[in-house]
Image: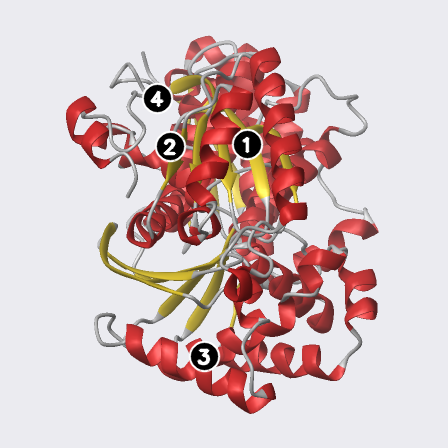
Amino acid sequence: MDGTAEQRTEGFGPFGRPIFKNPSARALSRVGVVDIGSNSVRLVVFDGAARSPAYFFNEKVMCGLGAGLGETGRLSPRGRERARAALKRFALLAEGMGATPLTVVATAAMREARDGPEFRTLLEQETGLKIWVIDGQEEARLSAQGVLLGWPEAEGLVCDIGGSSMELAELTGGKVGTRQTSPLGPLKLRDVGGGKKGLASYISTEIEKMTGQISTHHDRLFLVGGSWRAIAKIDMARRDYPFKVLHEYRMTKKSARATIDWIGENDLESLRASTGVSSDRMSLVPYAAQVLRQLISTFKPSEIAVSSYGIREGLLYEQMPLALRITDPLIEACHFAEATSARLPGFGEQLYQFVQPLFGPARPEKLRLVQAACLLHDTAWRAHPDYRHEVCFDMATRSNLGGLDHEGRVFLALALLHRYKNSRTAARHEPLLNLLSDAQQKEAEVLGKAMRFGAMFSSQAPDRLAEMRLFPKKKVLQLWLAPIAEPLFGEVAEARFASLAKALGVDTALKRRRV
């Protein structure tokens, strides 16, 4: 890749400077990243919890730098002008947001075009930015690390499709393995001759070349890139899926193939109107769909997962110290939310210890959701009391939370809704609840009512004041109160304890600790 000598000299990866200056950092100053792709140029400014950063700013311009590259060998003249304007704007925006210096990377179009080096020099002179042109292997690695930001310990095959190239990278035990790059970007595929048969043959041949190094035995295929996300939106529309968050959206081989067929059978303009995909992006979808069909045929994944995290997030993960990488992105994000938004930061962990006995020997996957809910239980306190339950539900389902699938999001949202409201009557929530089983909905209700009750002891650590013990076989929920806590167990607290017991389907028993 460009800058290899500088990389070895500086020791900070390919970008010559550390993003995380403090290895123990849990929060970061604003970090700006620009990705100059073959189809789009995007600026993202990250802020917040370092392990699960929020998107402080996110803007994309569909420049189409790689349009016609396969025929001319040069960048699109119109794309060059649009990219120049975008980079000038982004440089000024970043300065105003305190997100400088920007980290700028360029991928396939810039590295392959004959006028790529000249255009890079022009951009650097006009904007003052340092642009790193990375090769396909590096692009694959950074994209895979972006997946790791959202899926710690991920296993499977990452497929990142851009405008002019497509990369594959293997993930094993949370580490990036073999990587391959190919010319299978939709902008290049538009220039392939021979009609449908010629295109299919070309795609099949290129993917077959990649299997010489990449294993064909992967249970999960992670999709990274705008064209894949557009296909996921179409899959959601076809299935009438109730949840519109793309990150962690899952498809089966059967569903993906049905959607690929649906794309071929429907007018692109009608698909664009129903999904909100831009015209420029939608024009590339049929080519990406044919690539996906061949990927499914070759690798036969059991599950296909969509990742909104890619090369830009990979740049952050690249420089995270190991101690930060191995933390749970969901719990880190919830800790940050509690620290910045709750009335009593730190109480969430105490509440977690208080409610945990209700869930017995639950699997770690469930307990982390319980912990996350407890950390978030008070972060909506500024909302009007009549709407806190709705604000909580929307926050969990719509916030940028890594390490959380759709089922987990809805479980978390429902638990937080019941933190502030005994019953649910809002019809707008009901379609999302179909993602949960009846048992999961009941468990979320129990968690919400347990938090609602535990919050009554927020003047001190709940475990010093009271302890809950659940005996499922005897159908009894005991509450052991310390003498100092008896005044806290007033009428409202008693009513909330009774509501919790009713949700559990058990009777209550009040016990008093001896001092």
Q: CA distance from mark 1 to mark 2?
A: 11 Å
User: Residue 469, percent across and down?
Assistant: 40, 37
Q: Residue 44 bears which disc, if any? A: 1
Marks 4 and 3 sit apart, C-alpha to C-alpha, by: 38 Å
Please rate how many residues cluster around mark 2, counting C-alpha atoms within 10 Å: few if below 14, some from 14 to 19, many from 20.
many
Q: Which residue is mark 4?
A: 19
Crowding at dot 1, Cα within 10 Å, few <14 / some 14-19 / many 20+, comes out as: many
CA distance for labels 4 and 1: 15 Å
Label 3 neighbour load within 10 Å: few <14, some 14-19, many 20+: many
Please indicate, yes or no, whether residue 409 appears anywhere in the rendered image. yes
Left or right of 14 on screen, residue 99: right
Question: Toward the viewer: 503 or 239?
Answer: 239
Asked if residue 496 is positioned above or below residue 345 in the image, the reply reads below
Image quarter of the C terminus? top left
Please give the residue where the numbered disc 2 appears in the rendered image. 316
Single out the mark in the foreground, 4 or 3.
3
> Distance from label 4 to label 2 (Cα)?
7 Å
Q: For residue 104, which quarter of the picture?
A: top left
Question: Is residue 265 positioned above or below 214 on the image?
Answer: below
Secondary structure category for the residue under label 2: helix
Q: Of the residues shown, which amino acid type is indicated by label 1?
A: Val
Q: Earlier in the sequence, mark 4 or mark 3?
A: 4
Residue receiving disc 3: 203
Q: Residue flagged by tag 3: what amino acid is it? A: Ile
Check contact, mark 4 vs mark 2: CB within 8 A: yes
- Image point (45%, 31%), residue name: 121
